[in-house]
Amino acid sequence: MKKITFTMLCMFAIVFATYSQTFTTGTIILSNTSGLEYSAKIDITATEVTLTLIGPDDRYLGLGLGVLSMTEFRDVVMYLNGTSLSDMTFDGVGKDPLVDSNQDWSTVSNTTLLGVRTLISTRALNTGEPNDYVFSTSDTSINLVWARGNTASFALNYHGGGNRGITSSGITLGNESFELATNFKIYPNPGLTTFTIELLNNLTGVNLEVYDILGKRIHFQNLNKLISSIDVSQWNSGVYLVRVSTEENATLTKRFIKQ
């Protein structure tokens, strides 16, 4: 009886570990054009995909999944109507994408602050739709094409050469135990002269790095206490990425807005 119970517990632990794993691209900087910065982040579990888009709040945003061009019959998502993410399919280069009959993305959060939109949407890992991208729950990579509106409008129009691009990103296993152990708070956010960073657990070997939207590191320090105050009075107004990491290279990143 004890042997059977132990075996069942081991099986449960393996299944739980599999389903609790999260694979992530981390934050992908798509464009660092001043005032029009655009980034994406994809997090994948065994059942669900979470897509975070951060970009200008006054125009459409698009992201093609698993492609290096506007390849016909391939998956693309677009923020067009000012309220939610649209599930679409490329119809070829130079043609407007087509809206899918089934809208598989659900908007979890849609917020704007200081001209920056943060859109968080979720979708099933595999929708079963023939043109929807099938995400992988393993260490791999993904090709992406992106576009944003050429003008302050949600109408689907030609983006122009400076408002589109091609990139690829690795997808790696996120260290969830680290995230649970070193999740942190930033307040006030937005901030004007200082922000406070609060670690939720007392760990050693924790570093703080802050990057501007161009990817330049502007601040670094070791965090040797649970609550630390960071002087931001000399920083330019804008969006910054605040990254906490351990000596084991596990990282967690949040966004801070300097007023």
Image (cartoon, helix red, strand yellow):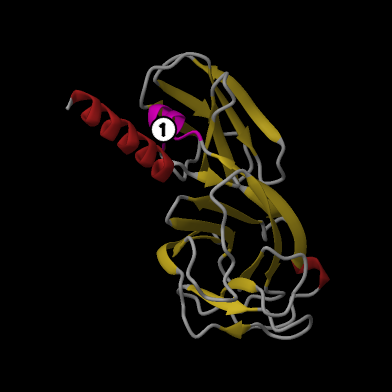
The answer to whether any part of residue 257 appears in the image is no
Image x and y of residue 193, in percent: 50, 35
Where is residue 24? Give x, y as percent.
55, 46
Q: Which residue is mark 1?
A: 183
Q: Nearer the viewer, residue 200 or 142?
A: 142
Q: Amino acid at mark 1?
A: Asn
Side (left or right) of 20 relative to 58: left
Q: Give the quadrant of the N terminus.
A: top left
Q: What residue do we see at 75% from left, 82% from top? A: 92
The residue sitting at 47% across, 13% down in the picture is 204
- Which residue sits at x=73%, y=53%? 168
Whole-percent x, y for residue 238 in the image: 60, 48
User: 70 and 244: which one is in front?
Assistant: 70
The picture quadrant where one finds residue 184 is top left
Query: Was residue 98 drawn as part of the magenta stretch in this picture?
Result: no
The vertical placement of 95 against 187, above or below, is below
Q: Is residue 252 visible?
A: yes
Q: Quick one: 99 or 198, which is closer to the camera? A: 99
Mark 1: few/some/many CA within 10 Å (<14, 14-19, 20+)? some
Q: How many marks?
A: 1
Residue at the farthest left position: 1
Task: Determine the residue positioned at 54% across, 22% down.
Answer: 246
Start-end of magenta stretch: 175-186
Q: Regarding mark 1 in the picture, which secondary structure is present there? A: loop
- Most foreground residue, 251 or 72: 72
Where, by quadrant of the figure, is residue 12 drawn?
top left
Magenta stretch: includes residue 177:
yes
